[in-house]
Amino acid sequence: MSTWTTVLLASALSFVLKFIGYLVPPRYLEGKRASNIVALLPVALLTGLVCVQAFVGDGGRVVIDARAAAAVAAIIALVLRAPFIVVVIVAAATAAIIRLF
């Protein structure tokens, strides 16, 4: 399958899923449970993305390297309530120092 075919199929699937969303009755979307799920879904997706980028290497194997150390350093900086730019700098510096050695 070519790249353009994949892009077009993904675009069509995205459109169909969005259209199906309009067909869901409003009573399913107005409850407390639905609003909690909608509020937490972006956090879960972002966490999954960060974990995959930090701990998965070539071939889908789990790899512990500078990326994982940078993620741990960023978590520590976040727990210490550092500003976001400091968290980014700490993570980048950690990865750079580990790759240097």
Image (cartoon, grey):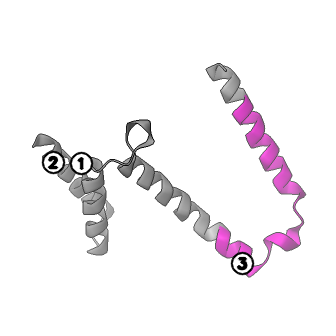
Q: Quadrant of residue 72?
A: bottom left
Please report contact status of discs 3 and 2: CB closer than 8 Å, yes or no.
Answer: no
Between the C-alphas of marks 3 and 2, the distance is 44 Å
Mark in front: 3 vs 2: 2
> At which x and y percent is residue 16?
81, 43
Q: Crowding at label 3, few (<14), some or many (≥20) Cα neighbours within 10 Å? A: few
Please report contact status of discs 3 and 1: CB closer than 8 Å, yes or no.
Answer: no
User: Which residue is labeled 2 in the image?
Assistant: 98
User: Which residue is labeled 3 in the image?
Assistant: 33
> At which x and y percent is residue 39?
62, 70
Residue found 87% across the figure and 69% down from its top: 26
User: Which residue is labeled 1 in the image?
Assistant: 66
Task: Name the amino acid, label 2.
Answer: Ile
State whether the magenta stretch is mostly helix, strand or loop. helix
Between the C-alphas of marks 1 and 2, the distance is 6 Å
Location of the C terminus (image quadrant): top left
Q: Do we see residue 88 in this rendering?
A: no
Q: Quadrant of residue 11?
A: top right
Residue found 47% across the figure and 60% down from its top: 47
Please report contact status of discs 1 and 2: CB closer than 8 Å, yes or no.
Answer: yes
> What is the magenta range?
9-37
Tell me, yes or no, whether the highlighted magenta stretch contains residue 72: no
Q: Earlier in the sequence, mark 1 or mark 2?
A: 1
Mark in front: 3 vs 1: 1
